């Protein structure tokens, strides 16, 4: 059983922020590093995958919806492509990269000291694209967790790009936030599980330098605009929550999404 786990999520093909987080002493010293999905769909897909593989046996990765979509595009499947960067990123991947993404599990269960079995997933344990938020009603969480064994008391997820820790009917639920597409705060959000304790961590970055690094390290045609929006975290957490909250869960006075959910990939 491992004692310390550094959890990262939603890298979305952004190498400089990933490197900054992996360089954190607590991440370097952790027994395991777990990435809870959406690794490569972004402006630096190959560089990110190759950097992650350097971590070797201490790395565990979970398949996110964007990873699944990349594989589908690479294999010529007829899917709704969510954004312009997905087909571009898919075209950069080798056959080995596609196999790597396709073989990733969802969810992943690991025994962690102080927590017991921990479920690492992307959207929710049952679906990689399910949207559950810090303020989602108990009924939505209950549906998302309906198939979990009773003794699985800790769930670590991603997908919505906003970090939080909360209890859901005695289960501990943790969202690690996002490395490459944070909503509300620029920099790399991540989580440390340490012998039963949870700490939300944040790695500050030189945002201008990170944007310039993405632009210099990518051939994606719209890389400057992409990095200016996502690495700079122009989308607020408030707008993201409004965008991602299902209509039936919204207060009666909320009648429209102020920012447009179609603007973001999850």
Image (cartoon, grey):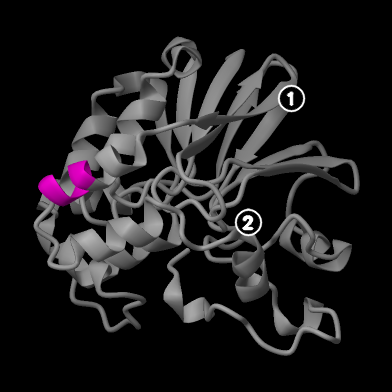
Secondary element type, mark 1: loop
Which of 51/212 is in front? Answer: 212
Q: Residue at x 90, y 48 (%)?
A: 169
Q: Which mark is residue 115?
A: 1
Look at 61% across and 69% down and name the residue there. 239
**Which residue corresponds to the image point at 20% horizontal and 71% vertical from the top-left?**
87
Furthest residue to the right?
169
Q: Quadrant location of the N terminus? A: top right
Q: Position of residue 126 (x, y in %)?
A: 62, 60
For disc 1, the neighbor class at 10 Å (few under 14, some 14 to 19, many from 20) is: many
Specify start and end residues of the magenta stretch as a single range: 212-216
Q: Residue 238 in magenta? A: no
Element under disc 2: loop
Compared with 187, 191 (above or below) is above
Magenta: main secondary structure equals: helix
Question: Is the residue 12 above or below the residue 221 in the image?
Answer: above
**How many C-alpha atoms fall within 10 Å of the one at disc 2: few (<14), some, or many (≥20)?**
many
| Residue 205 sits above or below residue 197 on the image | below
**Residue 234 locus on image (x, y percent):** 46, 60
Residue denoted by label 2: 124
In the rendered view, does 96 fall on the left or right side of 114?
A: left
**Looking at the rendering, which quadrant does residue 47 occupy?**
top left
Taking the image as shown, residue 261 lies to the left or right of residue 256, namely left
Residue that lies at the very extreme toward the bottom in this rendered image: 255
Residue 81 horizontal/vertical position (percent): 31, 78
Query: Distance of mark 2 from mark 1, alpha carbons?
Result: 18 Å
Q: How many marks?
A: 2
The numbered mark at residue 255 is: none
| First in residue order: circle 2 vs circle 1 | 1
Residue 4 in the image: state x and y as whole percent.
Answer: 58, 16
């Amino acid at each position: 059983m491992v004692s310390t786990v550094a959890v990262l999520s939603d890298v979305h093909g952004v190498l400089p922020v990933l490197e900054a987080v992996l360089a954190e002493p607590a991440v370097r010293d952790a027994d395991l590093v777990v990435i809870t999905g959406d690794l490569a769909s972004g402006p630096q897909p190959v560089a990110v995958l190759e950097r992650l593989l350097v971590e070797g046996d201490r790395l565990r990765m979970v398949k996110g919806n964007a990873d699944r979509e990349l594989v589908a595009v690479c294999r010529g499947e007829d899917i709704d492509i969510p954004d312009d960067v997905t087909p571009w990123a898919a075209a950069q991947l080798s056959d080995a990269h596609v196999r790597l993404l396709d073989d990733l599990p969802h969810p992943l269960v690991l025994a962690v000291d102080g927590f017991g079995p921990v479920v690492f997933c992307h959207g929710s344990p049952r679906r990689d694209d399910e949207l559950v938020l810090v303020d989602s009603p108990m009924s939505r969480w209950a549906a998302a967790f309906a198939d979990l064994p009773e003794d699985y008391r800790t769930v670590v997820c991603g997908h919505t790009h906003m970090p939080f820790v909360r209890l859901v009917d005695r289960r501990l639920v943790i969202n690690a936030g996002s490395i490459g597409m944070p909503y509300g705060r620029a920099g790399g959000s991540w989580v440390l599980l340490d012998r039963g304790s949870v700490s939300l961590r944040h790695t500050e970055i030189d945002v201008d330098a990170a944007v310039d690094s993405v632009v210099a390290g990518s051939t994606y045609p719209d890389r400057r605009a992409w990095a200016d929006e996502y690495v700079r975290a122009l989308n607020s957490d408030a707008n993201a929550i409004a965008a991602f909250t299902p209509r039936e869960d919204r207060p009666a006075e909320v009648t429209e999404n102020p920012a447009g959910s179609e603007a973001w990939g999850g």
